[in-house]
Image: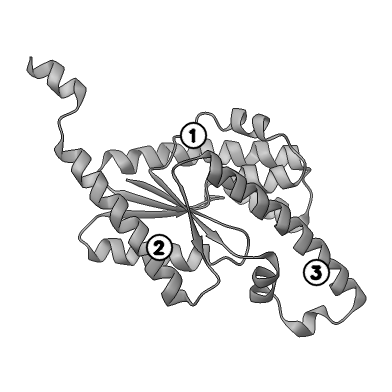
């Protein structure tokens, strides 16, 4: 089973990926916890470039797609081993973030067409102002420069969030979770969704596939 956790900066993706991974393991499943950008060569290049702000949006999107291409190989291998794969960010992040930077969603879909669809995508949804409050301190916003950065960040994250919410209407695999509550409240909602998905996954495994039936007859 393949699960992706998405959301804007500050929504709690890393925290809830780790908590979910531990919970699924406690249920008796082998898991593989991963993230994007990866720790591979392209992923490391992306991290360095993002720190320096060197890339334009199109180059950034292409690098993320290249990193994802390598990531998909690992994900497919782990799924083949019967593991539950949980990733922090996937191609929906590219559509939301690079889309908010002005790139065409259709083009972003095209360069990520190779990426398999997850069984479940959990979108941790929070307003931009809440996200920024979580990742910033009030003292850091006192100067006019910091205030300008705050409003620019808020405006950008609002665009990212809007795209995520539009994607949730388009893709049935995306479930929206209100991430404004406590860690315990949000994780309870996450586990509820994943628990149902795992039950469905187990039921499907019990049913013979069309290929199995053809081989039988």
Residue at the bottom extreme of this rendering: 139
The kind of secondary structure element at disc 3 is helix
Spot occupied by residue 62 in the image (x, y as percentages of width and height): 66, 36
Quarter of the image with the N terminus in it: top left
**Nearest to N terminus: mark 3 or mark 1:** 1
Q: Nearer the viewer, residue 88 or 106?
A: 106
Q: Nearer the viewer, residue 135 or 44?
A: 135
**Nearest to N terminus: mark 2 or mark 1:** 1
Describe residue 102's horizontal placement relative to residue 105 as left or right: right
State how far apart marks 2 and 3 are (Cα).
29 Å
Q: To which residue does mark 1 refer?
A: 115
Spot occupied by residue 119 in the image (x, y as percentages of width and height): 38, 43
Spot occupied by residue 149 in the image (x, y as percentages of width and height): 83, 67
Describe residue 2's horizontal placement relative to residue 215 as left or right: right
Q: To which residue does mark 2 refer?
A: 190
- Circles 3, 1 touching at the beta carbon (< 8 Å): no
Describe residue 132's horizontal placement relative to residue 217 as left or right: right
Q: To which residue does mark 3 refer?
A: 150
Point out which mark residue 69 bears. none
At 20% across and 60% down in the image, what residue appears?
28
The kind of secondary structure element at disc 2 is helix
At 63% across and 42% down in the image, what residue appears?
95
At 54% across and 29% down in the image, what residue appears?
113
Quarter of the image with the C terminus in it: top left
Q: Counting other residues with Cα less than 10 Å from the Cα at mark 1, is it few (<14), some (14-19), or many (20 or more)? A: some
Q: Counting other residues with Cα less than 10 Å from the Cα at mark 3, is it few (<14), some (14-19), or many (20 or more)? A: some
Spot occupied by residue 166 in the image (x, y as percentages of width and height): 61, 45
> How has the structure been colored for display?
one colour
- Circle nearer the viewer, 2 or 1: 2
């Amino acid at each position: 089973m393949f699960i992706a956790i998405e959301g804007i900066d500050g929504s709690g993706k890393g925290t809830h990926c780790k908590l979910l991974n531990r919970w699924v393991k406690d249920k008796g499943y082998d898991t593989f916890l991963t993230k994007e950008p990866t720790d591979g060569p392209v992923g490391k290049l992306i991290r360095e470039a993002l720190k320096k702000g060197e890339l334009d949006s199109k180059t950034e999107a292409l690098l993320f797609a290249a990193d994802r291409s390598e990531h998909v190989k690992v994900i497919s291998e782990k799924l083949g081993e019967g593991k539950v794969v949980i990733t922090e960010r996937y191609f929906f992040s590219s559509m939301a973030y690079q889309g908010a930077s002005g790139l065409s969603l259709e083009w972003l879909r095209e360069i990520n067409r190779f990426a398999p669809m997850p069984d479940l995508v959990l979108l941790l949804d929070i307003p931009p102002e809440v996200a920024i409050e979580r990742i910033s301190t009030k003292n850091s916003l006192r100067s006019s420069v910091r205030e300008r950065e705050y409003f620019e960040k808020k405006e950008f994250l609002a665009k990212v969030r809007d795209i995520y919410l539009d994607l949730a209407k388009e893709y049935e695999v995306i479930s929206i979770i209100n991430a404004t509550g406590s860690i315990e409240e949000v994780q309870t909602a996450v586990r509820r969704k994943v628990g149902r998905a795992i039950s469905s996954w187990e039921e499907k495994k019990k049913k013979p596939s069309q290929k199995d039936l053809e081989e039988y007859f």
